[in-house]
Amino acid sequence: MKCTIQGCPGEYEARTVVHTVKHRGDVIVIDHVPAEVCSVCGDVLLTPETVRRIEALLQATPPPSRNVPLYEFA
Ligand SMILES: [Zn+2]
């Protein structure tokens, strides 16, 4: 599929990404999220199904399987 960013000649390809969302004031990082990623500009598309599954995951708020250090850019 062609990239939706204007002027970008890239194509989306199926990849897994590290997805970061803010949820109830906390930053949550989800690894291995299936997404379409542009090979040129790196634009990331999530399918509605994937977004729905992420929301369901956040609703369930399971304890994270791994903790990562989070650095503020300051
Ligand atoms: Zn692109």
Image (cartoon, rainbow, N blue to C red):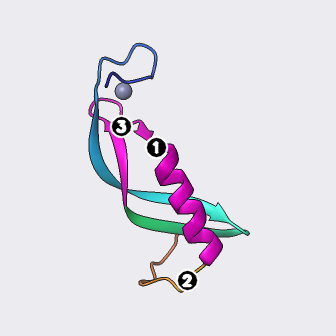
Most extreme residue toward the top, as rendered?
7
Task: Please provide the residue range marked out in magenta.
Answer: 33-60
Q: Amino acid at mark 2?
A: Pro
**Residue with the mark numbered 2:** 62
Q: Is residue 59 left or right of residue 15?
A: right
Check contact, mark 2 vs mark 1: CB within 8 A: no
- Spatial CA distance of label 1 from label 3 is 16 Å
Check contact, mark 3 vs mark 2: CB within 8 A: no
How many residues crowd around disc 1 within 10 Å: few (fewer than 14), some, or many (20 or more)?
few
Note whether 26 is above or below 55 in the view shown. below
How many residues crowd around disc 3 within 10 Å: few (fewer than 14), some, or many (20 or more)?
few
Residue at screen point 64% across, 62% down: 22
Most extreme residue toward the front, as rendered?
49
Is residue 14 located in the magenta-colored stretch of the structure? Answer: no
Is residue 48 located in the magenta-colored stretch of the structure? Answer: yes
**Residue with the mark numbered 1:** 47
Residue 27 placement (x, y as % from top left): 60, 67
Which disc is residue 9 wearing? none
Residue 13 placement (x, y as % from top left): 26, 37
Which of the two discs, 1 and 3, labels the residue nearer the N terminus? 3
Residue 63 placement (x, y as % from top left): 53, 86
**Ligand 1 within 8 angstroms of badge 3 C-beta:** yes
Observer able to see residue 2: yes
Q: Secondary structure at mark 3?
A: loop
Which disc is residue 42 wearing? 3
Q: Quadrant of ligand 1?
A: top left
Q: Quadrant of the N terminus?
A: top left
Which of the two discs, 3 and 2, labels the residue nearer the N terminus? 3
**Mark 1 or 3, which is nearer the eye?**
1
Q: Amino acid at mark 1?
A: Thr
